[in-house]
Image (cartoon, rainbow, N blue to C red):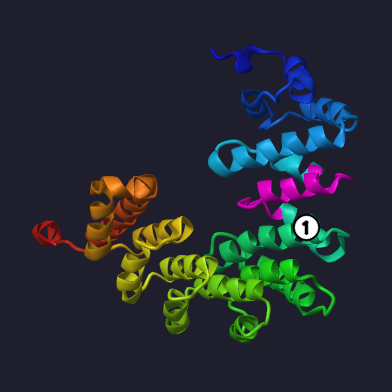
Amino acid sequence: MREEEVQPFESVLDAVFYQEPVPIHLLYRLSDLTADQMTSFLAGWQVLPDERRRVVVQHMADISEENYVVDFGPLFAEFLQDGFTPVRVAALEGLWDSSSTRHIEPITRLLQDDESVDVKAAAAAALAHYVMMAEWGELPQRISPPIVAALLAVYEEPETAVSVKRAALEALAASAHPRVPDLIDEAYEHEDPEMQLSAVFAMGNTADPRWMSVILDEMQSHSDAMRAEAARAAGVIGKSDSVPELAELTMDEAIEVRMAAVYALGQIGGERPQEILAAILADPDQEELHEMAEEAMEEMMWMGGELDLLDFAGDDDESEFYEN
């Protein structure tokens, strides 16, 4: 049995609060706390220096991004009320994929009322997941309209900072709200290049092929960031029309563009993307893309497996299934 599984909880807290550097392996013990453990944690937490709290919460958010088993949700909910802005931002990042609807109201309040632009932007980004889950039917559809209304209201406020507008637009793109196409058009024509980037991001999040001509054009942009964003959007939409352009981008001068193109090919799938990814994996000069290409191939195989299972379930002719 590992040390962190047998160490008394009070000893774990002492190490988490004061040991240098932060013992990341012990942070896993903060998942699924009992009521008594939560009380003990909060009692010690409130007297810690701002920077210590920030570092601990950021590590917890990083763990949540990689590990879907741990549940720091109740702690992140407490951290949303922290007086130190970076702690609130890190807590919102930790909730980016939460499916618990109890977090929606406090996150929405931060979007509307927090004094920090960084917190507002992080809150909008956190709400994007809820909008998407509702659209996919993974959460009740009724949760979406109030979130969308709050995002729209913040987006339309003249004094709203660009970073908040960007996050709000990207979140709104996943919704079926009729104003989304016009908002994307307006953002794409905005004088700020950052808003244009978010417009292309939003085009991808709509999963609407109507935007493909714009996305393909932006793959030729002089901006590395825009080419990467266009590649990402093409992958999300998933149309095979973009495969030739994405193949070219796998040889782009900018690594961020090459990485985005490789991952997009995995999302699109099919014979030609598989050939391109296999060629990258076989090329020693493309070693910096190998890990991403492997991830893309895994996603492609996973998606292919899902489709094969669906085909098999709907086809009683087993021999025909194996011939396809």
Q: Residue at x 73, y 21 (%)?
A: 20
Image quarter of residue 122:
bottom right
Which of these two is toward me, 101 or 215? 215
Residue 123 covered by magenta stretch: no
How packed mark 1 is, by other alpha carbons closer than 10 Å (few <14, some 14-19, many 20 or more), is some
Image quarter of residue 13:
top right
In this rendering, position of residue 95 left or right of residue 277: right
Give coordinates of residue 167: x percent, y percent: 68, 66
Q: Residue at x 32, y 50 (%)?
A: 286
Give coordinates of residue 151: x percent, y percent: 73, 71
Q: Residue at x 70, y 72 (%)?
A: 148
In this rendering, position of residue 62 left or right of residue 103: left
Give coordinates of residue 113: x percent, y percent: 87, 63
Which image quarter holds the N terminus?
top right
Residue 196 in view, yes or no: yes
Disc 1 target residue: 118
Asked which secondary structure carries label 1, the reply is helix
Residue 173 in view, yes or no: no
**What range of the chain is rendered magenta?**
79-101
In this rendering, position of residue 138 left or right of residue 251: right
Residue 83 covered by magenta stretch: yes
Which of these two is toward me, 207 or 196? 196
Which image quarter holds the C terminus?
bottom left
Give coordinates of residue 145: x percent, y percent: 69, 73
Which kind of residue does numbered mark 1 sit on? Answer: Asp
User: Is 138 located above or below residue 196 in the figure?
Assistant: above
In this rendering, position of residue 256 left or right of residue 166: left
User: Is 65 located above or below residue 147 in the figure?
Assistant: above
Which of these two is toward me, 245 or 286? 286
User: Is 284 located above or below residue 228 in the figure?
Assistant: above
Q: Residue at x 28, y 62 (%)?
A: 273
